[in-house]
Amino acid sequence: MKVSAKVRYGFRFMINLALNYPNQLVQIKEVADKEQISPKYLEQIAASLKKADLVKVSRGAKGGYLLPHAPQEITLLDIYHALDGSIQLTDCNNNLCPNGDECIMNTLWKGLSSNIEAYFAQRTLASLICQK
């Protein structure tokens, strides 16, 4: 499984917000410079996270982004879903396989996808920043 750049950068952005929780606003440019991510791309990621209610925006000259929820309440799965949708390792579930649900391999891929989802669901932003 290869995690998309969008998700990897989203995780890094959210970790930066968690490190500044609860009061300090974080500016996109600050995170982009620190993490070496394009500011425009990071703005797109932030927009998706805002739509999912995982970040809050404060406008103005001294504006920025912050978490609307405590870091222990935001899982990596929440972030993944906001940026890439569901975790699906193959196209078996998209009716592209002529064997469909009858395929023996379908059980393997669904089980592996479920395990990855469970792993991400068990990890919060707080658990990541505590390891730092």
Image (cartoon, rainbow, N blue to C red):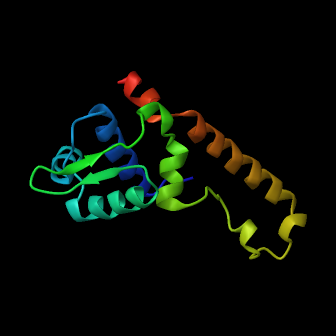
Image coordinates of residue 113 in percent, x first then y, are: 68, 50
Please state if 78 lies on the left or on the right of 33 as rendered. right
In this picture, is 72 found above or below 5?
A: above
Outermost residue to the right: 102
Image coordinates of residue 128 in percent, x first then y, are: 42, 30
Please state if 111 lies on the left or on the right of 66 as rendered. right
Count of labels in the image: 0
In this picture, is 127 found above or below 86?
A: above
Image coordinates of residue 132 in percent, x first then y, are: 35, 24
- Residue drawn at 29 percent across, 39 percent down: 16
- Image quarter for residue 48? bottom left
- Residue drawn at 74 percent across, 76 percent down: 96
- Residue drawn at 56 percent across, 40 percent down: 120
Nearest to the observer: residue 84 or residue 101 = 84
Nearest to the observer: residue 96 or residue 81 = 81
Image coordinates of residue 73 in percent, x first then y, are: 49, 35
